[in-house]
Image (spheres, rainbow, N blue to C red):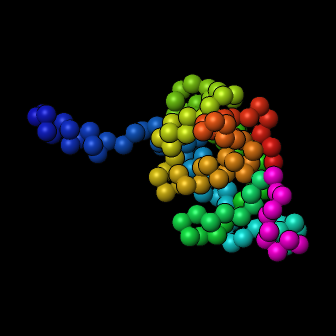
Amino acid sequence: MSAEQNLTSDMFEVDKRLGLKPVVDFNNYLQKAFGDGPCTCIRCRTSGGDETGYEYQHTFVLDGQTLNRRFANTTGSDVLNALKKAWLSYTKVDLPTLGALDLSAVKGFVEPQLHKRLLPLFLASGLVREIDGQWMLQVQAGD
C-alpha cells in the first residue's frame, strides 16, 4: 500500500470507541437533556421567564433555538454518572472527579453537533464551574 493510499484509508477510519454503548448512551443523553422551548417550571411561569437570581440557568438559546433543561433527568449526579461511564469506556481510565475538566477530551467522544450542549448542561447541572478560565469539576454536583 502506498503512503498516499495509507493516508486516505486513515482519514476514513472511524474510531471504534465511538460505538461503545456508554459513549452512544452519553450522546443520546446529551440530545435528550434539553426540551424544546423555554422552561415551563412554576418559577419560570411565575417570573415570566425572568431567571434573575436563579443559581442555575433553565432556558437556553443554542444556535437560535430556545431549549430548556429537563430537570428530572439532568441533576448533577445524573450528568456525572453518564459522563463517568462514557469517559471510562472511551479513555479506559476513570474520570477525575476533582480538578479541571478536559473539555476537549469530552468533545472527542461527543458528536460534533452536540458540542454546543456540553457546557450549558455541565454548568446548569452544577457539575462544573469556571475558575480562572478553567472548567473545574465540583466535589458535589448541584441540581
Residue 134 in the figure: left or right of residue 123:
left
Q: Is residue 120 above or below residue 36?
A: above
User: Most prominent secondary structure in the magenta stretch?
Assistant: loop
What residue appears at the point 82 percent right and 57 percent down from the top-left corner? 54
Residue at image coords 55%, 47%: 24
Residue at the outermost left position: 2
Whether residue 23 is visible = yes
- Residue pictured at 56% horizontal, 70% vertical: 64
Span of residues in magenta: 46-55
Q: Give the image quarter of residue 94.
A: top right
Q: Nearer the viewer, residue 130 or 27?
A: 130
* 136 lies left or right of 51: left
Magenta stretch containing residue 47, yes or no? yes
Q: Could you tell me residue 66's position as x and y percent? A: 64, 70
- Total numbered labels placed on residues in the image: 0
Residue 143 location in percent, x, y?
81, 48
Figure quadrant of the N terminus: top left
Q: Residue at x 50, y 39 (%)?
A: 104
The reply to whether residue 25 is in sight is no
Residue 57 placed where, x, y %?
74, 57
Where is residue 89 shown, x and y percent of the image? 55, 33
**53 or 121, nearer to the observer:** 53
- Closer to us: 116 or 78: 116
Q: Is residue 128 above or below residue 55?
A: above
Q: Is residue 138 left or right of residue 108?
A: right
Residue sitting farthest toward the top: 93
